[in-house]
Image (cartoon, rainbow, N blue to C red):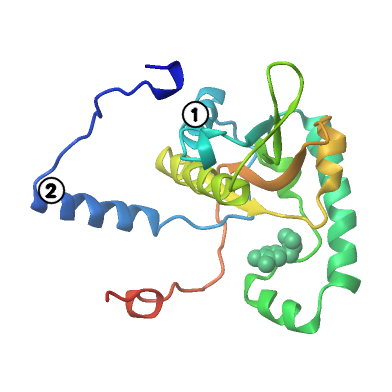
Amino acid sequence: MAESEKFLPLEFQQFDDATKLERARSFYHWMRQRRSVRDFSSKPVPREVIEQAVLTAGSAPSGANMQPWHFCVVESAAVKKEIRLAAEAEEREFYQRRASEEWLDALAPLGTDAHKPFLETAPYLIVIFLKKFSEGGGGEQRKNYYTSESVGIATGMLLAALHNAGVATLTHTPSPMKFLGQILGRPSNERPYMIVVAGLPENGAQVPAISKKPLEEIAEFI
Ligand code: IYR
């Protein structure tokens, strides 16, 4: 059998139905406590916690297992500052000119503006890049498949892994994000996908009073 066709026995943990339900409920209750945090403290978080969460993200399924992602974990105060300055310049454009009234209305409950101090205060900015192509062994370009789906799944797993470890997160997408590739020196086959800001909430941090839709509104069983 060719190397590419090698199969192994599946390791799969089985639970009885009561345990399945208990685990499903408790995971939901835990995950629904995750909130996007914008008031970050500068308190440190051990780097190994971030490494483990990135490993979890990297275990995500991906098109043809191409793993079309790269995680740039920014700890350097100087680089965080550079990112903040560039992001705030784009955000000022967004809030003052680019965003439609409709978009600004939709954002109003979140209380966001062009001011992004968390990009400097949080201990980590995890900048996720999407690779439309990967480098083959001989330096040639190899196409990746379903890249936005794959990187979206990995990002969701990263958020869940960080929340599970007691690390607060914010998904942040200054638009356009081209400056991230320049600041971080990433190659042209990678496009910035999202910044996941990670750290601990500031004492007394507040979050918007928003709710999630009930099951009947988001799902149907046919
Ligand atoms: N990127 C801007 C605007 C923004 C857009 C959406 I859609 C959000 O859910 C939140 C913010 C900012 O970060 O302020």
User: Is 18 in front, or is 85?
Assistant: 18
Please give the count of numbered marks on the rendered protein.
2
Three-letter code for the amino acid on which mark 1 is drawn: Leu
What's the CA distance linking mark 2 and mark 1? 27 Å
Residue with the mark numbered 2: 19
**Mark 2 packing: few (<14 Cα in 10 Å), some, or many (20+)?**
few
| 71 w.r.t. 36: above or below | above
In x, y percent, where is residue 21?
Answer: 17, 55
List x then y, in percent, for residue 115. 80, 58
Q: Quadrant of residue 221?
A: bottom left
Measuring from the top left, give residue 108's x and y in whole percent. Answer: 68, 77
Dot 1 falls on a residue whose secondary structure is helix
x, y percent for residue 105 = 71, 82
Q: Is residue 83 above or below residue 11?
A: below
Above or below, comparing residue 138 to residue 168 in the picture: above
User: Dot 2 lies on which element?
Assistant: helix
Residue found at x 36% / y 74%: 219
Quarter occupied by the N terminus? top left
Residue at image mark 1: 55
Q: Is residue 201 visible?
A: no
| Badge 2 residue CB within 8 Å of ligand 1 | no
Q: Is residue 35 left or right of residue 172?
A: left
Q: Quadrant of the C terminus?
A: bottom left
Q: Residue at coordinates 56% horizontally, 69% vertically from top-left?
A: 208
Residue that sits furthest to the front in the current view: 1
Nearest the viewer among 192 and 65 is 65
Q: Is residue 205 visible?
A: yes
Ligand 1 in which quarter: bottom right
What kind of residue is marked 2? Thr
Residue at (24, 28) in percent of width and height? 11
Q: Residue at x 65, y 33 (%)?
A: 70
Q: Mark 1 Cα within 10 Å, few/some/many (few <14, many 20+)?
A: some
